[in-house]
Amino acid sequence: MRLLMVILAAVQILISQPIAVGADGTAGGGADLVEASSFVESFVVRVVAVLKDEALAPSRRDQEFRRMLFEGFDTYGGARFALGRGWRTTSESQRAEFVALFREELLRMGKWLFEGFEGEVLEVSRVRPFAKTKIVVETKVSNPEARINDVDFLVLRTDEKFQILDVYLDGFSVLETYRSEFVGPLFRGGVERVLRTLRKRLAN
């Protein structure tokens, strides 16, 4: 427990600037902006704490990280966006497999991102409405020498909860990059080519 408390203190997220408050009561209203910021704060702290908790067996850490990541992200919506126009032409079984493979890709990316925190602090610099049900939580990494300086979260507000739709690393959308640089070129050979490539990539 002491180790966990030290980790939580090391990666705590500080609100460094006033939150931008919208005029309406949906996503963009003051309460929603504060809640979105708190959601991102809590999510990052818990995820990093699990990845750094040496009291857990590696298999248990991976299990807990997987559970929290898939709860915190809208993986179905992300997969649908990543596949782009191909989503409409795929079968239900192809969609299901692509979502499963996309989740594994997201897992790899998430571990790369969050395992890289070594005592840095994420400072929430701004929270702003993006659309009626979406909010952007902008953060900065406290260490200027870190491999990434800005990490922004696009958050979806539903009736019951918040979920992360996309992450922007130094201004670059993870989903946009994944779709344009990986899925898009592969899709010229059909969705089966995409699935075959992902299977091989994740098997390595």
Image: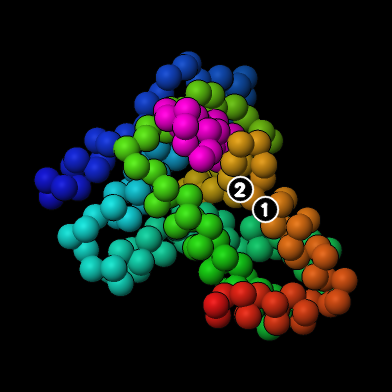
Percent of width and height locating residue 178: 69, 57
For marks 2 and 1, give the CA distance.
6 Å
Which residue ends up furthest to the front in the rendered image?
145
53 to the left or right of 158: left
Task: Say left or right for 11 vs 40.
Answer: left
Tell me the residue at 56%/19% (across/down): 20
The answer to whether marks 2 and 1 mark residues whose Cβ atoms lie closer than 8 Å is yes
Q: Residues within 10 Å of mark 1 (few under 14, many from 20)?
A: some
* 109 in magenta: no
Residue 166's disc is: 2
Farthest-out residue, top? 18
What residue span does the magenta drawing correspond to?
A: 136-153
- Name the residue type under label 2: Asp
| Residue 76 in view of the camera | yes
Residue 12: x and y, percent? 32, 34
| Residue behind mark 1 | 175
Vertically, is 11 above or below 174?
above
Q: Secondary structure at mark 2?
A: strand
